[in-house]
Image (spheres, grey):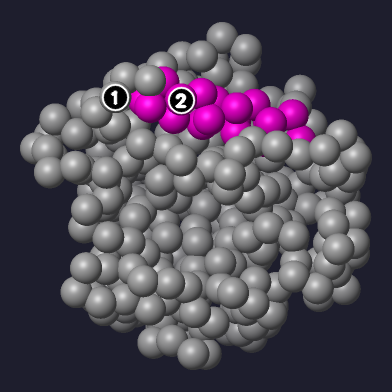
Amino acid sequence: MKDHIKNSENPSPESVKLCTASLTASSSPSRGEGCKKLNFITAGVPLRAKGYEDGFQVLDEMNLDGLELEFVRGVRISDKSREVVSNAKNKVITAHAPFYVNLNAREDDKVEASIQRIIETAQTANELGGFSITFHAGFYLGMDAEAVYKKIADGIKIITDELKKVNNNIWIRPETTGKATQWGDLDEIIRLSKEFETVLPCVDFSHLHARYNGGVNTFDDFCAIFEKIGNELGQSALDNFHAHIAGIDYGAKGEKKHLNLEESDMNYKDLLKAFKDFNIKGAIVCESPNIEDDAKLMKEYYLSL
C-alpha cells in the first residue's frame, strides 16, 4: 500500500532529529534518511524500575527500545538523570510536554506560559538526544475552529522560530486528542504540519478511537490514516513516525481513561498489522497503565507478523 504514497511538496529542513538511538545535541542528520525500524518504547520509566538507571536496565531485559520523558507537571529532570539518559546506548528518546498547555487560552499570559513549556521541553529533549516531542495543543473553548487553528498556528510559529535560532531541529508534534472539546483531530494537525518544516503529527490511535466514540478501530481505518499522512506529508513522515497506543475507556464525550490493551476493545493487532504493511518506522509509545508489559506485548506481536 505504501507504493501509493506520493512525494510531498512540503519543503524539508536541512537537518532534523531522527529516532536512531541516543543522538547527541550536536547531531544533524538529514530528514530524508529516516529511522531504521519501528521502536517500541514506554511512556516514562518502567513501573518496575526505581529510576532512569534501573529503568534502562529493565528496558534491556525486556528487549524494549527506549522511553518517552514524561514532563507532566513541569520540565524538570535531575542532573544525575540527565547524565543517565544522555549516556543511554541504543535507546530512542522522546518527550511529552506538561499537560498545562493551551495555545488557545483566552489569557495572553497562559498562552505565553504554554509556549515556554513547549520550548523548554524541546530544549531539554534535544540536549538529551531526543528525536521528537509531543503535547496537547489546546482546547476550542467554544470558539470557531478556524480562529482556533490560526491562534495555535501563531503559537507554533513562535516556538519553531525560537528553536531555529539555537539550531534545535527536534520534531515538534501536536498530538491527536481524545475529546471533541480538544483541538487536534488528524486533519488539523496534518494541515499545521504543512506550514512548518519541523512539525509532524503525533498520532495517538487510542485518542482517535475515543474521540469518535469507538470508531477508527479497523485495519482499513488504520491504513487510511497512514495513507493520508503519506500522501499529504510525504514518505519521510512515515519514516519518522511518533505514535501513542494504549487501551482506552471512552463514552459519548470521548476519552475517560487509559486501560491495559487486553482489558479494552482497542484493536491493537490490526493496528500493528497496518504498521507492518506500510513499513512504518519511528516510535510507538505505550501509554497503557502497565506500560512496559503492553509495550512488550505489542513488540512481540509485531515481530511475529
Could you tell which of marks 2 and 1 lies nearer the N-terminus? 1
Q: Secondary structure at mark 1?
A: loop
Horizontal side of residue 98 vs 128, given as left or right: left
The percent coordinates of residue 109 (x first, y second) are 38, 20
The span from disc 2 to disc 1 (Cα, nearest Å) is 10 Å
Magenta stretch bounds: 110-128
Q: Nearer the viewer, residue 179 or 199?
A: 179
Within 10 Å of the Cα at label 1, are there few (<14), some (14-19), or many (20+) other Cα atoms? few
Residue at which label 2 appears: 113
In this rendering, is residue 247 above or below 112?
below
> Disc 2 residue type?
Ala
Name the residue located 33 percent from the left edge and 61 percent from the top edge: 178
Q: Is residue 233 left or right of residue 275?
A: left
Residue 208 among those drawn in magenta: no
Return the x and y of residue 265 as percentages of the image width and height. 39, 87
Tell which of 11 and 218 is nearer to you.
218
**Up-down relation of residue 264 to residue 80 (above or below):** below
Residue at the (27%, 32%) spot, across then down? 104
From the viewer's perspective, is residue 74 above or below residue 240? above
Q: Nearer the viewer, residue 296 or 232?
A: 296
Q: Quadrant of residue 47?
A: bottom right
Identify the secondary structure beneath mark 2: helix
Q: Is residue 251 visible?
A: yes
Label 1 sits on residue: 107
The x and y percentages for residue 251 are: 25, 77
**Looking at the image, can residue 155 be seen?**
no
Tell whether position 126 is magenta: yes
